[in-house]
Image (cartoon, rainbow, N blue to C red):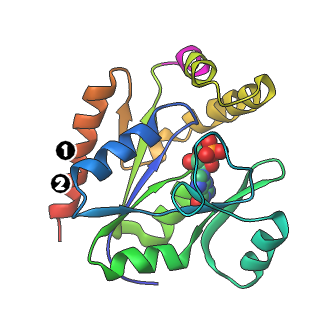
């Protein structure tokens, strides 16, 4: 698949990458659009189908894997699948915009290896694991077991940060957003 550019945000859950991605979408609505992932997990809080994710049953997800509808997909947590639909990326490229992704570290590196120079892979770092844990608790969207799982995964993911093109430490959110604006604009200006 060949087309436009890809901007990949990957980070441990709770590091603030979703907030940064939303900020960029608001700042540059005519330049970038969000790739809505598919997931087999249940809807959370005020999430909407076709806006935050496409929610598929485990069976439907499997069927779409068999149909080769995904650019990448993964079992991010045991029994829960997430994936990037080829149709999403094509839809956005057709409008002349770059695609922005909020995906986990493995998925991000997978896309980077497929699209190389057409992709910018950005890793958002939490200031520390302790702060990450606090943020997940404050978010009040995850059970204690889910937080433990997310922290264990974060510890592994932090070790892969150097495989990304850029990393942004999210200590003060406004500063992280500004830095993200800069790197994204630089990348979009490049031919
Ligand atoms: P959450 O359940 O908190 O929405 O997401 C859990 C993790 O799955 C996050 O790290 C999120 O970035 C990741 N994720 C979301 N969509 C995708 C996707 O399409 N592919 C991959 N590999 N990971 C994804």
Q: Which residues are magenta?
A: 128-133
Give the x, y percent position of residue 139. 58, 25
The correct choice, above or below, for 59 with respect to 133 in the image is: below
Compared across the picture, whether 85 is left or right of 4 comes to right
Q: Is residue 19 visible?
A: yes
Based on the picture, tell me whether residue 132 belongs to the magenta stretch: yes
Magenta region, main secondary structure? helix
Compared across the picture, whether 119 is left or right of 84 comes to left
Compared across the picture, whether 123 is left or right of 189 comes to right
- Residue 182 bears which disc, if any? 1
- Residue pictured at 82% horizontal, 64% vertical: 58
- Residue 186 bears which disc, if any? 2
Give the x, y percent position of residue 164. 43, 48
Q: Is residue 106 visible?
A: no
Give the x, y percent position of residue 185. 18, 54
Find out whether the residues at labels 2 and 1 contact each other: C-beta distance under 8 Å.
yes
């Amino acid at each position: 698949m060949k087309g436009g550019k890809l901007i990949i945000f990957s980070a441990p859950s709770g590091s603030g990458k979703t907030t940064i991605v939303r900020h960029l979408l608001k700042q540059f609505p005519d330049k970038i659009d969000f790739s809505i992932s598919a997931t087999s997990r249940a809807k959370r809080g005020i999430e909407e189908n076709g806006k935050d994710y496409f929610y598929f049953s485990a069976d439907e997800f499997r069927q779409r894997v068999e149909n080769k509808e995904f650019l990448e997909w993964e079992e991010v947590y045991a029994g829960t699948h997430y994936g990037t639909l080829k149709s999403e990326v094509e839809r956005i490229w057709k409008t002349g915009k770059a695609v922005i992704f909020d995906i986990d570290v493995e998925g991000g590196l997978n896309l980077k290896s497929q699209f190389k120079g057409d992709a910018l892979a950005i890793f958002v770092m939490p200031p520390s694991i302790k702060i990450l844990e606090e943020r997940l608790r404050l978010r009040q969207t995850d059970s204690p077991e889910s937080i433990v799982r997310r922290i264990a995964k974060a510890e592994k993911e932090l070790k892969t940060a150097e495989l990304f093109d850029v990393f942004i430490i999210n200590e003060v959110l406004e500063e992280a957003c500004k830095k993200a604006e800069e790197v994204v604009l630089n990348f979009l200006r490049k031919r």
